[in-house]
Amino acid sequence: MRRTSALGQYGEEVATRHLEGLGIAVVERNWRCSEGEIDIVAREGATLVLVEVKTRSSLAFGHPAESITPRKLRRMRHLAYRWLAEHEVHAPSVRLDVISVLQKLSGAPVVEHLRGVE
Amino acid sequence: MSLAEVWGVVTTGIAGVMVKVEVDVAQGLPSVGVVGLAGASVTEARWRARSAIGNIGATWPAARITIGLSPADLPKGGTSLDLPIAVGVLAATSQIPRSSLRDSTFIGELGLDGSVRGVDGALAAAIAAHRHGVGSVFIAPANARQVHAIPGLRVRVIRDLGQLIGILRGTDDAPGGQGDWSECTDEGANLTSGPGVSSVVQHEADFSEIRGHPFARFALEVVAAGGHHCSMIGPPGVGKSMLASRLPTILPDLPLDIALEVTSLASLSGQWPTERGIVYRPLLQAPHHSSSSAAILGTSRGRQVFPGALSLAHHGVLFLDEAPEFSRPSLEGLRQPMESGVITIMRAAASATLPARFQLVLASNPCPCGLAVGRGDACTCTAMARRRYAERISGPLLDRIDVRMTVPKPSTADLANPKQEASAEIRARVLEARSRAEHRYRGEPWSLNGHVPGAALRQRWRPTDEAEALVRSLERSAASLRGTDRILRIAWSVADLAGADQPSAEHVASAMVLRGGHRGETT
């Protein structure tokens, strides 16, 4: 469990750097409410971007992004409304992104950024 | 991200329809969607394709994949689209060059290990691809025998997806040389040998196994020579089914175009395993009398057409044992195809015209108890019961049947004689008789005596004067005009078998006996 969450935290770190590299401002990380967690909240221009980060250390159990199910997407959308309601931020559009981070035992992490996954 | 187009084929029950498989690989959550009225087996193709691609060491993209099947309004079934879908994914992700797909069609089911498996409708599919003008067709080894028989089509046989990738990349070094381009025109022309032909050795029914029945043997020879429909009446157990089931063995081989047509129909309906190659001998269809009229005449469900026994008996024999027991719609439904050689199946959703140039053989008992032979002393049926039994085969149907023979119980002397002529010898005579008729009717739309229209028969081709006089006297006495036409038609077949240029009085007399008369009518 500890190793997994350590890997997850590392992945979120990599994802944040990736977003900042793209000029996307990270607003908040690991926002939690009673219904779940949003890994990264960011803004790209006027668009509010909610990011789910998936980190894996191998492809043995499939591609990281494959673990995002339609059910999980629905929950992300729901969390987006919760976040907006609590922050009173005006965002003309909201987008859900998935960032998959593949960190093998050696070498640099492989980052894939899927925009607007709905 | 990228788009690829691949040609595949689906079958609609009788023929293949070209389907353009478009594969779009776009950024997004990994998913695979199939659009274009795909049936369950087609939507499952994505999972077979995914496992197959993974297991041969190629990469299934973690992306949003949309597979479009065009024409999008045609319902699609079967597994023949597995291969084009997998190829499309590989091309869209640049694992194979897209240019290699031009001018090719892919037909095959995929195993999860990447192996390519045969599909039932491969022949019909390959014919459709050939008509569409594609240069080459990629198929599974199981389908090779059938598809190789199509003249002028370049066929490439592939064992598995890995081999296919090698071929399309142009780096194929697959051992065994099975993936060679092959022009099969020569093999197709010679159907009785060559790799396109089944060499499955089975017990073949043969006329040499029938003892006795000299008259029935002669009658069936005439039936085969002239392509006549016939009816047999005889007590149970005398060998009517044995005789009828051997009629195909004395019919000539099917010409290539018809063989392909019959093979498509037979393998699409699951009656002819694709591994057996081409049907080059006439088929026997002997449906049970409890069969529905849909099973005999053919039917359709949605746009899918299901050929009936009479279409599967195309250029073969449709044998209805216990004919009076068949349902009336089944029997009456035969009448129109008997004249036209095709059957048009019309339903609300679709209509289809299927080939149905069959030779009909009816077998029935003389009465419900089956004992009304000879003087009929042993028969226990009432006159009414006998009449009702005979009436089940309607006049108009019986009218289309040229030869009406009675099959008596063979005598002890007949049974004692073991030496009987084999089918091959009879077939040789039938072939000769048919070629005489073909020569006579050259330039006409028919080539068999059984298909000559009555008017043409009376005016264009005349028997000898003596025979003519016999026919006239017959006309004056009892026979109807149509009855004499039938007799003339049979007489021509008898004459053809005898090697005569015109039917003589003797041939007409034989024809009158063969014409018989089951219901007390003279002709």
Image (tube, grey):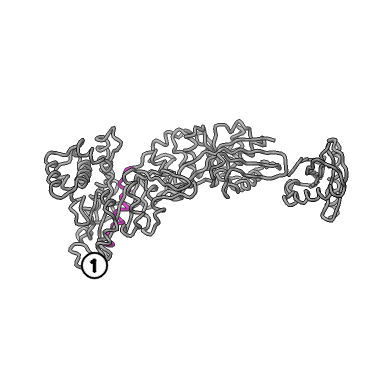
Residue A7 in sight = no
Judging by the rendered image, the residue that carries numbered circle 1 is: B382
Horizontal and vertical percent position of residue B300: 46, 49
Q: Is residue B22 left or right of residue B339?
A: right
Q: In this view, does A15 lie to the left or right of B131?
A: right
Horizontal and vertical percent position of residue A56: 79, 47
Q: In this view, does B95 lie to the left or right of B77?
A: right
Q: Give the range drawn in magenta.
A: B235-252
The disc labelled 1 sits on which kind of residue? Thr
**Label 1: few (<14), some (14–19) or many (≥20) C-alpha neighbours in 10 Å:** few
Number of callouts: 1
Chain of the residue under label 1: B
Horizontal and vertical percent position of residue B378: 21, 68
Q: Is mark 1 on a helix, strand or loop?
A: loop
Quarter of the picture holding the N terminus of chain B: top right
Instruction: Name the image quarter holding residue B25.
Output: top right
